[in-house]
Amino acid sequence: MRMERLKRIVSACDRINEWIGSVVVTTAVFGFILVIFSNVVMRYVFNTSFVFMAELEWHLFSFVFLMGAGFTLLHDGHVRVDVIYSLMGRRKRAMVNLIGVFIFLIPSCVMVLVTTVPWVIVAYKVGETSIDPGGIPARFLIKSALPAGYFLMLIQGLLLAVKSGVVLLETPPEESKVKI
């Protein structure tokens, strides 16, 4: 009963990163493509460019990658050496994931969160803007995507650890049969 409840909680939490990846990031990618297209047309057709548009392109690019990290982890899309991993059984992959989450993912996410949250708070307090004339007036907004993206990835990493733990705690099918 407890395991089923845990699985439902994990599934509900997975839906958060699923929604962010499929709605928020997809919308940002569409905006990113429009900004790039606009920049190309302005530069090559009208022989002009705006600092605001160039910065918006960078900000949207950053936003897509930061907010999409948890979604990518949810769908097992992060880069790793799959030569050995793909040959492993389900339980061994779960063990690798569990160790990787606790040794690499959690410490790196916590480090980024601890160092960037104060940085973002200061940016909000001073109302940080672009240093370039005509640049984006709210630079602090993109800075807030850094801890938000790492927080989403941390949450997804914790969910991966729980899923891996469930796999390791489940009785393997061949052991559950009564031997006569």
Image (cartoon, rainbow, N blue to C red):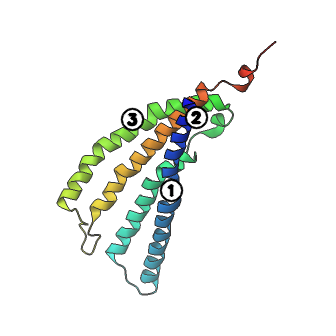
Which residue is the site of mark 2? 4
**Res 158 visible:** yes
Quadrant in which the C terminus is drawn: top right
Q: At label 3, which amino acid type do we have?
A: Pro
Q: Nearer the viewer, residue 104 or 172?
A: 172
Q: Residue at x 42, y 82 (%)?
A: 42
**Res 96 visible:** no
Q: Position of residue 95 (x, y in %)?
A: 57, 28
Image quadrant where residue 153 sits: top left
Q: At label 1, which amino acid type do we have?
A: Trp
On the picture, is 168 further left or further right than 99? Answer: right
The answer for how far apart the CA atoms under marks 2 and 3 are is 29 Å
The answer for how far apart the CA atoms under marks 1 and 3 are is 25 Å
Check whether the beta carbons of the residues at disc 2 and disc 3 lie within 8 A of each other. no
Q: Is residue 26 above or below residue 103?
A: below
N-terminal of the pair, mark 2 or mark 3, is: 2
Which residue is the site of mark 3? 107
Q: Is residue 159 above or below residue 40?
A: above
Mark 1 surroundings within 10 Å by alpha-carbon count, few (fewer than 14), some (14 through 19), many (20 or more):
few
N-terminal of the pair, mark 1 or mark 3, is: 1
Which residue is the site of mark 1? 19
Q: At label 2, which amino acid type do we have?
A: Glu
Check whether the beta carbons of the residues at disc 1 and disc 3 lie within 8 A of each other. no
Q: Residue at x 45, y 35 (%)?
A: 104
Q: Residue furthest top?
A: 180
Quick one: SS at disc 2? Answer: helix
